[in-house]
Image (cartoon, rainbow, N blue to C red):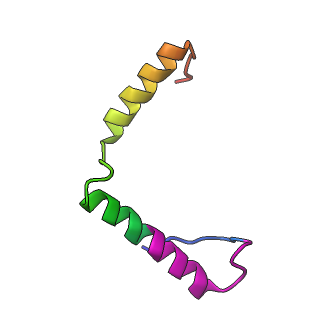
Amino acid sequence: MPVIIEHIPWIGEDSDAVESVWDAEVTERVKDVKEGRVTLISGAEFQCGTDALFAELGIKRLA
């Protein structure tokens, strides 16, 4: 399913330009993962890290 970008003012209305920029960004992010510059984590790991940070900062999270 394609991602729909409603409007990016700095690109204008050229949908080919939007798709080109988007594809380049995705390609770079995939390359970062493949080359080990970033590590993907699960949603549960992210949630635990966020919960720990909020607790450390004394911020109460809404359920």
Q: Residue 21 location, x and y as percent?
A: 54, 76
The residue closer to the viewer here, 4 or 49, is 49
Quarter holding residue 1: bottom left
Q: Is residue 45 magenta?
A: no
Residue shown at the point (30%, 57%) measured from the top left:
33
Q: Position of residue 59 (x, y in %)?
A: 57, 17
22 inside magenta stretch: yes
Q: Residue at x 52, y 24 (%)?
A: 63
Q: Is residue 18 above or below residue 36?
A: below
Type of secondary structure dominating the magenta stretch: helix
> Start and end of the magenta stretch?
9-25
Q: What x and y, as percent, mark residue 2?
A: 46, 75
Q: Look at the image and tell me whether residue 5 can be seen.
A: yes
Picture layout, residue 14 above or below residue 6: below
Query: In this orientation, does residue 2 appear?
Result: no
Residue 21 placement, left or right of 7: left
Picture coordinates of residue 26 (x, y %)? 42, 68
Q: Residue at x 39, y 28 (%)?
A: 49
